[in-house]
Image (cartoon, rainbow, N blue to C red):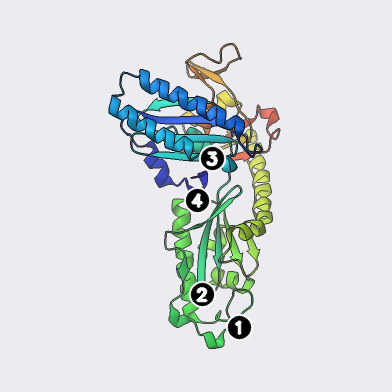
Amino acid sequence: MDSNVLTPEVLRELRAPRPYPAVSLTMPTHRRDPRGERDAVQLRNLLAEAEHRLESDPKVDRRTRAAVQTQLGRAVAGVEARLLLDGLLIHADADEHRVWYLPREVPTRVVFSDSYLTRNLVAAFAQSRPYWALGVAADRARLWSGTGESLQEHRGDGFPMTAPTETWDVEREERVGDTPSTFTDEETRRFLRSVDDAVRAVLARRPRPLHLVGLPPALALLAEAGNAASQAAAGRLAKGGLVDGPAPVLRRELRPVVEDHARRQRREVLDRLGDAKSRRTFAAGLDEVWESVREKRADLVALEEHYRRTVRVCDGHLVPVNDETATRPDVRDDIVDELVETALDGSAEVVFLPDSTLAEHEHVAAVLRY
């Protein structure tokens, strides 16, 4: 399982209370180590630490201890070195386990609680810049879910969609790529209106940038039939033969479109930060942004992709710590991920920017609602 399948429903499930202990293991990994030998050693050590804590925790009875140990063992055995990215997160309780490969570095830690740790997962998902890609032809439509280097077909919310068979006349078909010559049929327009309505519903529940894929006549008719998809579109790939993928080919063709949108988004974010600074609705630096996020005053939070900071919370403020104090129990070494999760929970937009982009603002800044 990877962060591409993190939906609001899955997140709610992960955060739901569950019998103690719900165990979360996190550790940094090395995506460029094909055999994963260093990571395998660290993972074994982390598993040993978790098992030791299970053995010594008086709140865990023998039956629960054995069940959780079994799930942890299965999770560790199922980790695939070839899938490792920059961080690994394992969730396990007495009944299940989940493995997440994260495109974001995480601290090494073992957490026992009555719900799973999610802040690192949420931050990694936000950094992976999730998007939708809608492939459209006159007789069918498919929705694809993309994050970083991953692209998977989204099956649900009515997708994939196929036009009713009576709208399709094979005798009149003149194929150009994957687009039939039925663009003048009212039934085709009706079908594309239903596609537009389905996309509107998906975007309302899970807002992400939307990229449209298809031949120009198909995209033009989609815009004519309804306006939700076209108005929301962050990019367009006017090319046939891609509605059905396959995913690796579609991802490769989409890459320039996705990257162009990311560049435009960076410019827009910097403009918004500049405007906020002139209107004095601006916060900069970890402590200021943390305070605004906790008060739900942040409308936009921008931070550099690899910004990390270890802190101690003192009287509601964040105090940076050095190596000598980093082992104290009140120290939080993933405070940036916690900030991202809190910001998203407060309905703030979170955008990651290239390193050094926000150097003059201490690597993190926010546009405030008031």
Separation of residues labelled 2 and 4 (CA atoms): 26 Å
Q: Amino acid at mark 1?
A: Glu
Asked which secondary structure carries label 1, the reply is loop
Q: Residue at x 56, y 73 (%)?
A: 221
Looking at the image, can residue 91 be seen?
yes
Asked if disc 1 and disc 2 are in contact, CB closer than 8 Å, the reply is: no
| Residue under numbered circle 2 | 139
Q: Is residue 111 above or below residue 100?
A: above
Residue topped by disc 4? 207
Q: Residue at x 62, y 60 (%)?
A: 250
Q: What residue did someone put label 1 on?
A: 174
Q: Amino acid at mark 4?
A: Pro
Q: Residue at x 46, y 24 (%)?
A: 48
Which mark is nearer the camera, 4 or 3?
A: 3
Q: Position of residue 52 (x, y in %)?
A: 41, 21
Q: Dot 2: few (<14), some (14–19), or many (≥20) neighbours within 10 Å? A: many
Kind of element beneath mark 3: strand
Find out whether the residues at labels 4 and 3 contact each other: C-beta distance under 8 Å: no
Q: Which residue is mark 3?
A: 101
Point out the tag, 4 or 3, that comes first from the N-terminus. Answer: 3
Which residue type does callout 2 highlight? Asp
Q: Is residue 117 above or below residue 161?
A: above
Crowd class of label 4 (few under 14; some 14 to 19; many from 20; radius 10 Å): some
Of circles 4 and 1, which is in front? Answer: 1
107 or 16, which lies in front? 107
The image's mark for residue 265 is none
